[in-house]
Amino acid sequence: MAWQGVIEEYRDFLPVSDKTPIVTLKEGNTPILRAENLKKKLGINIEIYFKFDGANPTGSFKDRGMTLALSKAIEAGSKAVICASTGNTSASASAYAAKAGIKAIVLIPEGKIALGKLAQALVFGAHVIQVKGNFDQALNIVKAIVEKYPITLVNSINPFRLEGQKSASYEVCDQLGFVPHYHALPVGNAGNITAYWKGYKEYKKAEKITSLPIMLGFQAAGAAPLVQGKPVEKPETIATAIRIGNPASWKGAIGARDESGGRIDSVTDSEILNAYSLIASIEGIFCEPASAASLAGVIKLYKENYFKNGDSVVCTLTGSGLKDPDIVFKVSKEPLKVKAETQAVEKVIEGII
Ligand SMILES: *Cc1c(COP(=O)(O)O)cnc(C)c1O
């Protein structure tokens, strides 16, 4: 049977009833891919799998939570949704609001926003407001607005977001047919790592699985409040989706780490870009820089002899590289220019093959 979207597929695990109108773009069921080439190239003795959530309808895992957030907002009679976002949340909220036929209001912070993400919010018809401040300030404003107006907040502090995002952990187990030893994720606001851990625990409680993975979270070195143990005033990283100084789900991330016996560590922008380029050039997956923090972190821990021979590690690739294609030019050369003559092209080709 055709895939129904995460709410219908995992209804028993989600807070919906027969009365909940389902708003879906048939999100989920994203590919899980074994990284054979990577294993050979790096000469490593662990099995790495990529869960490519950039293959969701708006190009990021945010859709998993947004289907539930919008469905519950409609059930509650809401006429609009609002979020503060550096990109993917706004793209997803705008698309699901369009599908639901209600308004979306998006506050974007100052500074570089990936053009693809902004384009999505605009084309889906959201009302986009840029505030002269950072993400954390924009989120504070949004929180104040929903106190006063009948608008639903759809940032990850909306508990339905995390409920929907749990579905990714169910899919990992269902697709692999086993529970990985480790699950690695990039960490920004820390909602996703919180959601995965909750999902794994609930799947075990329901006896769908018999073990739990160890959770690994990776922040960018310039935006690593969880690693430093205190908020970061001016977070900086090329990985804009995880450029967050004071994560909303701080406790959830620490809980996932400590209950599973895992780690939250940081990776530099250059480690992130290396992983980003590697994933694309040898595995054929174009993810966002933030997504690549998961593999960058696994490589870092591998070098510290953290893993055992044969361990399985799932890395979630959270978003699509097409969102922010400019970054490619930091890791790849510009196309070669030659005369429009067969000979000229032949000369180049002879240097390639
Ligand atoms: C939102 C996002 C993240 C960070 O997820 P959190 O739940 O905020 O930790 C990472 N990568 C991408 C592509 C994202 O859109």
Image (cartoon, rainbow, N blue to C red):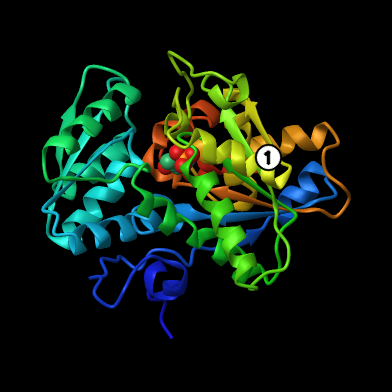
Residue 37 screen position, x and y as percent: 72, 52
Q: Tell me: 323 left or right of 97.
A: right
Q: Tell me: 13 left or right of 129.
A: right
220 lies above or below 151: above
Task: Estimate how packed mark 1 is, as few (under 14), some (14 to 19) or many (20 or more) residues with alpha carbons within 10 Å.
Answer: some
Q: Tell me: 339 left or right of 271.
A: left
Residue designated by label 1:
258
Q: Residue furthest bottom?
A: 1
Q: Residue at x 66, y 68 (%)?
A: 176
Front residue of 329 and 322: 322
Q: Tell me: 244 left or right of 258.
A: left
Residue 350 screen position, x and y as percent: 65, 42
Q: Quadrant of the N terminus?
A: bottom left
Front residue of 126 and 7: 7
Residue 133 screen position, x and y as percent: 27, 17
Residue 164 screen position, x and y as percent: 41, 58
- Whether residue 284 appears in this view of the structure is yes
